Image (tube, rainbow, N blue to C red):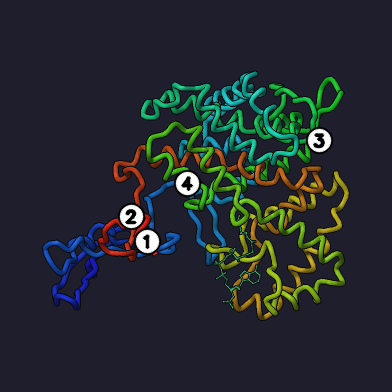
């Protein structure tokens, strides 16, 4: 049987080393023994942006980008989107197994009963400028929650962690909805515990003068599906931020604030808004070929297409496309959908896109649905953050319990000046 090892010959010294391979990887620290002298620090691997470095072992999410597969804890995303709920999927992602009925009931009960936020947090939100971006408000207030729950510092106590997990999943929609209403100058709508997770979120966003808000069941379900699709995506930029910041053993509110900050960036959580702008600029189906010419001439990017990991159809995009039809049966068809479908049809037949394996990603259709549901563009990353919170918490907890993990601290290749003596100001030229 072939040996699960790698043999390396260092041509600088002529020495040969045999390094174990586990799960298709070598340990980067095994390279440290490769030295040319006693005072040599040892060989490092250079990998900006972690293009080929596994930062952890994980049992949470599996992606096969070539085959377009996404699974949470082994369950295909298609089955979860069709048959599960967001809260059940959140339980699965955090606990590793689907809940039994009593486990699910207890889980939903706790999350439903932690949706309220302290009135002082509400006052804190009032301090934001009237046109503050809802994602900026969310990032600030979720971080501020750590001052309201100082016990959350006890991150190594499993019962305490569980409490903060309930609170974070429960309060994210409340913070998000309050941030949105603050930006409109509308009074905050308090949580309604009679409603589902998504239904209550719609209530806190859109309730006006009616005594009881009744969410449309189709939109409530669509929102739940969209949240499921965003729960986790293995070691993406914000999950990596959550793990890295959490590795300092800070409380989870501060770590989630860091993860949400990473998500705020346009290269991560902001692409669906860019898709909407692009579709608006194209304006009509007839102008699609003209726009694609510009893309091929490198004058524009086809937003919502392409992915670092998926080199075939993003499975989430397929589900969103189906969900869009259900949403439009209630809201009326978003005219941008026809432009998107035409873009997809032509692009998928075009050599430029086929050769580069560019397919629609999750963001290609999500913005169109959100727009039809009445969500303003600024709130799209906030919706993403709500869906992703259980994933961040699962990544954080897995990191804390992994004996291989320590405080995250990458190495660098120093290429700056060597030793030089301080020059007094009057002697500098
Ligand atoms: N439109 C036109 N050309 C594209 C696109 C696109 N959307 N995406 C990639 N390409 C081209 C590149 O120009 C490159 O061509 P070349 O080899 O001739 O130079 C080739 O396809 C490979 O692209 P890379 O940029 O190397 O792919 P990478 O994996 O680095 O980038 C990314 C992935 C950032 C998602 C890219 O496809 C892109 O910018 N897409 C548009 C933005 C977008 O939709 N982002 C959302 C991603 S999903 C998410 O984060 C939730």
**Disc 3/disc 2 C-alpha distance (Å):** 71 Å
Determine the secondary structure under disc 2: loop
Residue 271, percent across and down? 66, 56
What residue sits right under mark 2 in the picture? 424
Q: Is residue 202 left or right of residue 106?
A: right
Pointer 4 or 1: first along the chain: 4
What residue sits right under mark 1 in the picture? 428
Between circles 2 and 4, the one closer to the viewer is: 2
What residue sits right under mark 3 in the picture? 216
Most foreground residue, 376 or 222: 376
Marks 1,3: beta carbons within 8 A: no
Most foreground residue, 231 or 184: 184
Determine the secondary structure under disc 4: helix
Pointer 2 or 4: first along the chain: 4
Q: Is residue 10 left or right of residue 196?
A: left
Quarter of the rendering containing residue 219: top right
Q: Does the residue labelled 3 lie within 8 Å of ligand 1?
A: no
Q: Is residue 75 left or right of residue 196?
A: left
Image position of 413 with respect to 328: above or below: below
Determine the secondary structure under disc 1: loop
Image position of 91 with respect to 163: above or below: below
What residue sits right under mark 4 in the picture? 241
Residue 428, percent across and down? 37, 61
Marks 3,4: beta carbons within 8 A: no
């Amino acid at each position: 049987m072939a040996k699960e090892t790698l043999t390396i010959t260092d041509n600088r010294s002529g020495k040969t080393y045999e390094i174990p391979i586990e799960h298709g990887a070598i340990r980067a620290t095994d390279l440290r023994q490769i030295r040319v002298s006693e005072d040599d620090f040892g060989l490092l691997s250079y990998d900006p942006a972690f293009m080929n470095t596994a930062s952890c072992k994980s049992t949470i999410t599996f992606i096969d980008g070539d085959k377009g597969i996404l699974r949470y804890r082994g369950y295909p995303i298609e089955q979860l989107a069709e048959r599960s709920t967001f809260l059940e999927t959140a339980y699965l992602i955090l606990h590793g197994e689907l809940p039994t009925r009593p486990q699910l009931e207890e889980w939903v009960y706790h999350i439903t009963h932690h949706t309220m936020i302290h009135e002082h947090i509400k006052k804190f939100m009032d301090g934001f400028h009237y046109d503050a971006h809802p994602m900026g408000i969310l990032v600030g207030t979720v971080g501020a929650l750590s001052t309201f729950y100082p016990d959350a510092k006890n991150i190594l106590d499993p019962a305490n962690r569980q409490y903060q997990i309930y609170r974070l999943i429960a309060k994210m929609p409340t913070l998000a909805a309050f941030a949105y209403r603050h930006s409109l100058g509308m009074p905050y709508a308090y949580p309604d515990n009679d409603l589902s997770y998504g239904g209550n979120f719609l209530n806190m966003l859109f309730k006006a003068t009616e005594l009881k808000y009744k969410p449309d069941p189709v939109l409530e379900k669509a929102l739940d599906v969209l949240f499921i699709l965003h729960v986790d995506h293995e070691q993406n930029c914000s999950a990596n931020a959550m793990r890295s910041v959490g590795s300092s053993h800070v409380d989870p509110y501060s770590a989630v604030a860091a993860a949400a900050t990473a998500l705020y960036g346009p290269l991560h959580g902001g692409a669906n808004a860019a898709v909407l702008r692009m579709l608006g600029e194209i304006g009509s189906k007839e102008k699609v070929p003209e726009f694609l010419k510009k893309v091929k001439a490198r004058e524009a990017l086809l937003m919502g297409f392409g992915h670092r990991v998926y080199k075939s159809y993003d499975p989430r995009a397929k589900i969103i496309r189906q969900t869009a039809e259900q949403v439009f049966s209630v809201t009326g068809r978003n005219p941008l959908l026809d432009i998107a479908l035409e873009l997809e049809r032509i692009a998928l037949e075009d050599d430029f896109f086929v050769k580069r394996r560019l397919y629609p990603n999750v963001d290609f259709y999500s913005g169109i649905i959100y727009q039809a549901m009445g969500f303003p563009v600024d709130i799209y990353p906030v919706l993403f953050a709500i869906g992703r919170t259980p994933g961040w918490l699962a990544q954080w907890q897995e990191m804390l319990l992994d004996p291989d993990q320590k405080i995250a601290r990458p190495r660098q290749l120093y290429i700056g000046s060597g030793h030089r003596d301080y020059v007094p100001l009057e002697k500098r030229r």
